[in-house]
Structure formats: structure tokens, C-alpha cells
Image (cartoon, rainbow, N blue to C red):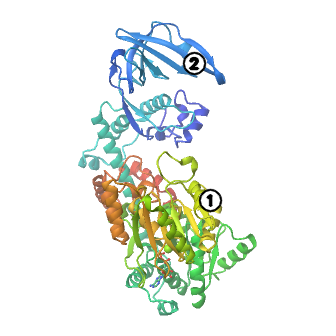
């Protein structure tokens, strides 16, 4: 007897090879198989006569094979099978490429339902490589058919049949993880019904019911997990710290902190004085001075005898933090060290020994801080910078290095409240809204293509004054060149170098490069060895090049507001006046509204709210940067209400059964825990 945990090889037609292919889709067991949801559906309920077949569309018709198929060999060892099918209204010419078995399968006089793209004209209808099945079979035609994302070695009919078998084997023995009262309170269907109809809906109404139930379940499980995580934190003890005087820290700084910086520091210090571990997000616009909040916390921890780790998403950023913090810590009589992937073995060994001996108070680095041989003497505080590039799991892995260290997360991505609830559901939040005084606002312009030569003159002027320039393109290389006018990094760099600025130092940077290569190019730019950096949005995060004064965004209409805001934040970090130039010839009213809104404010939160209003939350989640498990069905753009309901229901349930130990919640508990296996271990 099959169970949900039975391997997919149980399914007829799935052997070793296909099971391997399915693994690529993350399908291992029957449970995985039936939780592999269609990407879309094709309505194949209408069966046409040949004469009625709509040319140019995909459609089904019933027809009889009229003669014996012919097979031809063509160039490249390929085969073509041709066969004619008829009904009382006309004839259909069918061609199969590289499917020689069709010649043996199809016999004169037999009837089939064919489904494919209809080509030809009124007199002669044709199909190439249609799907087909015997009349009356109704698995692939005559119904709404699920269309799945595929991988090499797996085709639609194969997957459709496999899912059918998987459903038959375990649909009814799969526990319904939603408690009955929750299901009823929200008028949701049973799980067995939902699984059946999400794959093989009888009509679009049942599909909608199935979808609603499973999306709710997804949000419910996720919010349960987040609440449990938060709950857990209150149950354990964090590193014990007591109040110390921060005045020496403040007076070691070359400037006075803003009120918001002080407030964020007070929040964090308050957390570290409490029993439970801190888990705080410090959100502040680019340039708002979050690094100093981190530094104050590390100082506080050090005075209490605890070590801190600060993890940055790139080596350049880690280096940059080191450059700022090392001298500051030295003035304070504390030691700070840098550990990255390129730290040499001998140096690394020395550094690790010092770390274990407790001689290093603050360790800065990249993912390298997660490596197993990095052992701390007494890790009390873990800070991650620009956390949206890190997953929840990575944070948790670093957490494992200490007992239950305090966690501080720095992020420059302003997130509207509702979304923060899900993305950072287990975090407390401090917000820095003020920028340090004396900062000149970046001047923003929108220009049309016809001003290109004036813009080039402006770029040259900036460089001649000793400044540096970013140019952002929406695409990577020549191969991406589309018929439209979108600029690509590689091609545009070449053109600029050969035709426009032969005498300037220009470098290209994009996400398809190896990370080492990216680091080198970014470091050279930061060191002032390059005048112009042509890049995709990979420069979006964090790096501080105070000497860069001009940000040019090509095809600005292709970027979201929040993205543009991050890009603009790359300049205006020094004392010179900085500029952001958006190039766009668009006359789309909505896009113009977006770009004008961007021009009129420098406030990241205002821009985030605008972005949410104009484009919906999809964008915040689109790039999967939030570090939460991917949502398969729930679309937060449309399901904000469902999210609300799921959250309320989850909270209520956990109030009654805080650890999900009630046997009636066993299925739910398993799902919740499988979602956060690594994370939960890290915070346990
Ligand atoms: P972000 O929040 O983007 O990480 P940083 O911490 O990198 O910002 O700070 C940006 C710049 O502002 C740095 O050069 C930093 O030294 C400087 N800075 C931070 N706080 C203040 C302040 N209160 N007054 C003046 N300059 C400050
Ligand atoms: Mg920063």
C-alpha cells in the first residue's frame, strides 16, 4: 500500500531515469507529486468538428484515421510521420516530427481526439505534433487540463498521468491539516477535494474553491511557523548584559548621531538588557547611518564581555564596514577583524585562534562567517546587513554559533507595514527616517533620448571634476539585445569606450559574472580606479562610493520605484552635489506618473507606499529576496485579505495550543516544522 511518503517510482511509467528527472522539480514522494501544482490550465472541454476548428488557436477535434501513416527520413537523422484524419465535415493533415512510433500506433479506421495548434486554411486543416488520446479516454482532452512547469525528460502527458495516479493513491489518506473549526469558519473545502480539483477541476468554480483552500493553508502554515518562532524566542535566555555608559562611544565619533539613530540604539540596547534574545530589524533609508547603530550595539556587547559578528552580503561591503569600524574600535580600545573568502590561510588561522581566545570583539565578513571552523569565544550579538539578500535560514545558521545570540538586522528596503508582517514576522522593528544633517539631496532629472549628447557632456564634466559615474542598464549582454531600444551592459560599455569616451576608464558589471570578478570590479571602482561603471542593478545594494556623484539610469521605465530609489542612494554619499538622471522616452501616462513621483521625493518610505499603490506588493516578493519559503499558490497581491484571515486564525489556534502538541494538530505541526527545520534548529 502506498502512503504519501512512498517514492514516486511507485507510479506506473516512472522508473529510475524519470524519478531522477522529477527530483529536479523537487518531487521525491507521492506527497511532493500531488503538491506540485499546475502553472496554468487549458480548457479543452470543447471538442470541435474539423470544419469548425479555429485556425491559429489550440483546439481539440474528434477524427478517424483515414489511411496508413507514412514515415520519411529527413536531414539530421530526423523522421517525419504523416497521416490523414477525417470526420464528416472535412480533413485534417497531421505531421509528427521525431515520433516514429506514431506510425505503428495509429491504424486506419480508428478514432482519436487530437489536440494541437490549428494551422492551414478553410479548406485544409493541419496540426503538428498534436496530443492525442482514444475517444472516451478523457484524460488529456474533453476537460480542463492542468499544465505543469516541466524539466528535461518529463513531458505534460507523462506528468498529468503521474499526478492522476498519485492522487488516486493518496488523496484520501493525506491528513487534512486544517483544524475543522478553522476550515468551517472560513468556508473552505476539504483538503482531499482541494487536491483533486487543483489538478483536475471539473469547472472553473471548483478550481477556484480548491485554490482558495490551498492558498489559505499555505498562509496559515507560514504564519503559524512565524508565530512559533517568535514564541520560541520568549522561552529562551539570551546573552545576559547589563547597562553600561555609551558616552565613550558617542564621543569617539566624528559627528553627532541623529535622534533616530539614538532611538534605534536605545531600542536595541533595551532588547539586549531583557531576558530573551533580541531579534530586531533596523530599517533606514540608504545613507541614514545604520552602520553606527550596529557599531553602538557591538560596543555595548563588548563592554559586557560578549563578541559580535557582522555579516554583509558582499565582500566589498564587508571591507567597507571594516574600513569605517576598525579605526573607531581602535580608538575605543577594542579589536575588530575582517574574515572573507579571500583571507589567506595563514592569516585566517591566526585570526580564528584570536577569535576563539576572545581577543577579537567584532568580526566582520561575508558568508565566510558561517563556515564550521569559525569558533567564537563568546558570541553574543549577530548583525546582518541588508538582510533581504540573506535567507531566514542563513540568519539562523549564524545564530547557531552562539547560544542564543542577540540578532540585529539592518535593511535599507523600506517595507510597508502589512508586508513587513510577513517578511519579518518574527522581528521587532526600529525605523530611521532622518538623514544625517548637511546631506545635499540628490537632484533628479528625467531626460529624453534626444538630449543624449548633452548628457554625455555632463558625464564628461563630472569625471573631469574628479568624480565617478554609474550607468545602469536593464539588460546584461548583446545576446539579450531585443528589437526594442533597451540598453545592455556589455554592448553599451563597448560602444561608450570606442565611440564616446575613448579616453576614460570604463568598466562593466553584471550578475552573470563570477562573484570574484564582480568583487574585483566593484573594489576597483570604490578605489577610484574606474571613471564610469556600466552595470545592471547588481550595484543596488549598500556599497558606498562617496566620490560617485552621477547615477544615470537607462530605460528608466523598466525599473520599479523602490529599485530606482535604491539606485539613487548609490550617489549623494559625499560632500559634493550629486545627480540622478533617468533616461526615458516613454509616453505611457502611468509610467510618467511613476517617474514624476520619484522625482518629487527623496523619502524611501513614501516611495515604497507609492510603489505599493501603483504596482502592488508583487514586486516586493518578486525577486524572492525575503528569505521565506516560496509561496506556491498564495499571491499576496490578491490575497492580502486571505493573509489577514490566516493570521488571525493562526494566532487563535496557537493561543489554545501554543506548541501544537494537541494530537489533532499533528499534521499541521509536521508541516509547520518541515517549513522551518533549519531555522527552528537555529533558534532552538
Ligand atoms: P546606511 O544606513 O546606508 O548603511 P551608512 O551607515 O553607510 O548608511 O552611513 C552613510 C554615511 O553617513 C557614512 O559615511 C557615515 O559615516 C555617515 N554618517 C552616519 N551617521 C552620521 C551622522 N549622524 N552625521 C553625519 N554623518 C553620518
Ligand atoms: Mg549600509
Residue 423 in which image quadrant: bottom left
Task: Judge left or right: residue 668 versus residue 403.
Answer: left
Front residue (pair 321, 439): 439
Question: Relative to 581, does residue 127 appear above or below in the rendering?
Answer: above
Residue 146: % across, % down: 40, 33
- The image shows residue 619, relative to residue 404, as above or below, that is above
Residue 2 has which mark? none
**Residue 122's spot in the image, x, y percent?**
37, 17
| Between marks 2 and 1 in the image, the one whose residue lies nearer the viewer | 1
In the displayed structure, would residue 562 be above or below residue 549? above
In x, y percent, where is residue 665? 37, 51
Residue holding disc 2: 80
**Residue drawn at (62%, 77%) of the image:** 377
- Give the structural element (helix, strand or loop) at label 1: helix
Any part of residue 554 in sight: yes
Q: How crowded is mark 2: few (under 14 residues within 10 Å), some or many (20 or more)?
A: some
Residue 639 located left or right of residue 29: left
Q: Is mark 2 on a helix, strand or loop?
A: strand
Picture coordinates of residue 493, whole percent (x, y): 58, 59
Observer-nearest residue: 366 or 127? 127
The residue that mark 1 highlights is 498
Looking at the picture, tell me which residue is in the foreground, 644 or 470: 470
Establish whether ligand 1 lies closer than 8 Å to the Cβ of label 1. Answer: no
Query: Residue at image x 31%, y 55%?
Result: 590
Q: Considering only order in the chain, which callout, 1 or 2, is on the residue closer to the N terminus?
A: 2
Q: Label 1 near label 2: C-beta < 8 Å?
A: no
Q: Distance between the residues labelled 2 and 1?
A: 50 Å
Task: Give the quarter of the image for residue 142.
Answer: top left
Amino acid at each position: 500500500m502506498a502512503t504519501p511518503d512512498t517514492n514516486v517510482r511507485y507510479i506506473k511509467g516512472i522508473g529510475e531515469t524519470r524519478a531522477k528527472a522529477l527530483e529536479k522539480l523537487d518531487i521525491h514522494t507521492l506527497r511532493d507529486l500531488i503538491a506540485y501544482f499546475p502553472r496554468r490550465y487549458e480548457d479543452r472541454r470543447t471538442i470541435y468538428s474539423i470544419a469548425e476548428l479555429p485556425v491559429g488557436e489550440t483546439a481539440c477535434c474528434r477524427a478517424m484515421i483515414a489511411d496508413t501513416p507514412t514515415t520519411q527520413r529527413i536531414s539530421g537523422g530526423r523522421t517525419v510521420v504523416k497521416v490523414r484524419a477525417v470526420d464528416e465535415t472535412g480533413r485534417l493533415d497531421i505531421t509528427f516530427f521525431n515520433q516514429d512510433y506514431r506510425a505503428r500506433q495509429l491504424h486506419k479506421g480508428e478514432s482519436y481526439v487530437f489536440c494541437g495548434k490549428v494551422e492551414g486554411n478553410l479548406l485544409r486543416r493541419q496540426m503538428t505534433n498534436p496530443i492525442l488520446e482514444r475517444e472516451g479516454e478523457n484524460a488529456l482532452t474533453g476537460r480542463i487540463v492542468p499544465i505543469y512547469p516541466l524539466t528535461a525528460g518529463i513531458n505534460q502527458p507523462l506528468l498529468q498521468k503521474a499526478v492522476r495516479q498519485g492522487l488516486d493513491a493518496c488523496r484520501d489518506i493525506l491528513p487534512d491539516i486544517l483544524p475543522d473549526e478553522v476550515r468551517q469558519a472560513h468556508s473552505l473545502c476539504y483538503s482531499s477535494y482541494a487536491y483533486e480539483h487543483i489538478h483536475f477541476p471539473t469547472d472553473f468554480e471548483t478550481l477556484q474553491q480548491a485554490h482558495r483552500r490551498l492558498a489559505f493553508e499555505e498562509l496559515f502554515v507560514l504564519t503559524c511557523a512565524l508565530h512559533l518562532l517568535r514564541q520560541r524566542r520568549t522561552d529562551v535566555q539570551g546573552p545576559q548584559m547589563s547597562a553600561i555608559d555609551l558616552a565613550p562611544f558617542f564621543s569617539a565619533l566624528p559627528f553627532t548621531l541623529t535622534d533616530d539613530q539614538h532611538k534605534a540604539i536605545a531600542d536595541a540596547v533595551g532588547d539586549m538588557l531583557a531576558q530573551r534574545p533580541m531579534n530586531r530589524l533596523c530599517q533606514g533609508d540608504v545613507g541614514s547611518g545604520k552602520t553606527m547603530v550596529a557599531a553602538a550595539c557591538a560596543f555595548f556587547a563588548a563592554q559586557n564581555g560578549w563578541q559580535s559578528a557582522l555579516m554583509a552580503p558582499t565582500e566589498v561591503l564587508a571591507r567597507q564596514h571594516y574600513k569605517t569600524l576598525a579605526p573607531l574600535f581602535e580608538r575605543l580600545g577594542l579589536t575588530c577583524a575582517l574574515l572573507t573568502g579571500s583571507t589567506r590561510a595563514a592569516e585566517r588561522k591566526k585570526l580564528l585562534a584570536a577569535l576563539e581566545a576572545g581577543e577579537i570583539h567584532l568580526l566582520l565578513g561575508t558568508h565566510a562567517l558561517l563556515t564550521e571552523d569559525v569558533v567564537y569565544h563568546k558570541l553574543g550579538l549577530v548583525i546582518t546587513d541588508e538582510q533581504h539578500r540573506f535567507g531566514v535560514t542563513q540568519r539562523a545558521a549564524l545564530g547557531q554559533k552562539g547560544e542564543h545570540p542577540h540578532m540585529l538586522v539592518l535593511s535599507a528596503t523600506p517595507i510597508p507595514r502589512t508586508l513587513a508582517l510577513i517578511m519579518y514576522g518574527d522581528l521587532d522593528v526600529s525605523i530611521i527616517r532622518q538623514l544625517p544633517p548637511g546631506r545635499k539631496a540628490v537632484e533628479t532629472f528625467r531626460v529624453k533620448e534626444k538630449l543624449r549628447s548633452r548628457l554625455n557632456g555632463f558625464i564628461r564634466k563630472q569625471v573631469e571634476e574628479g568624480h565617478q559615474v554609474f550607468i545602469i542598464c536593464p539588460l546584461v549582454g548583446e545576446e539579450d539585445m531585443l528589437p526594442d531600444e533597451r540598453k545592455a551592459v556589455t554592448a553599451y560599455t563597448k560602444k561608450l569606450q570606442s565611440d564616446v569616451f575613448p579616453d576614460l576608464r570604463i568598466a562593466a558589471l553584471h550578475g552573470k559574472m563570477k562573484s570574484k570578478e564582480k568583487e574585483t570590479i566593484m573594489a576597483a571602482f570604490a578605489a577610484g580606479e574606474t571613471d564610469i561603471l556600466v552595470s545592471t542593478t547588481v550595484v543596488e545594494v549598500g556599497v558606498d562610493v562617496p566620490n560617485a556623484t552621477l547615477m544615470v539610469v537607462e530605460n528608466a521605465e523598466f525599473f520599479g520605484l523602490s529599485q530606482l530609489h535604491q539606485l539613487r542612494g548609490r550617489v549623494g554619499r559625499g560632500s559634493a552635489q550629486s545627480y540622478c538622471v533617468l533616461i526615458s522616452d516613454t509616453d505611457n501616462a502611468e509610467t510618467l506618473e511613476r517617474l514624476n513621483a520619484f522625482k518629487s521625493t527623496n523619502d524611501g518610505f513614501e516611495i515604497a507606499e507609492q510603489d505599493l499603490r501603483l504596482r502592488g506588493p508583487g514586486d516586493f516578493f518578486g525577486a524572492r529576496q525575503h528569505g521565506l519559503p516560496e509561496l506556491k499558490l498564495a499571491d499576496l497581491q490578491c490575497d492580502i485579505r486571505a493573509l489577514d484571515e490566516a493570521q488571525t486564525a493562526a494566532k487563535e489556534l496557537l493561543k489554545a495550543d501554543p506548541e501544537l502538541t494537541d494530537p489533532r494538530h499533528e499534521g499541521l505541526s509536521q508541516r509547520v516544522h518541515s517549513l522551518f527545520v533549519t531555522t527552528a534548529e537555529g533558534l532552538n
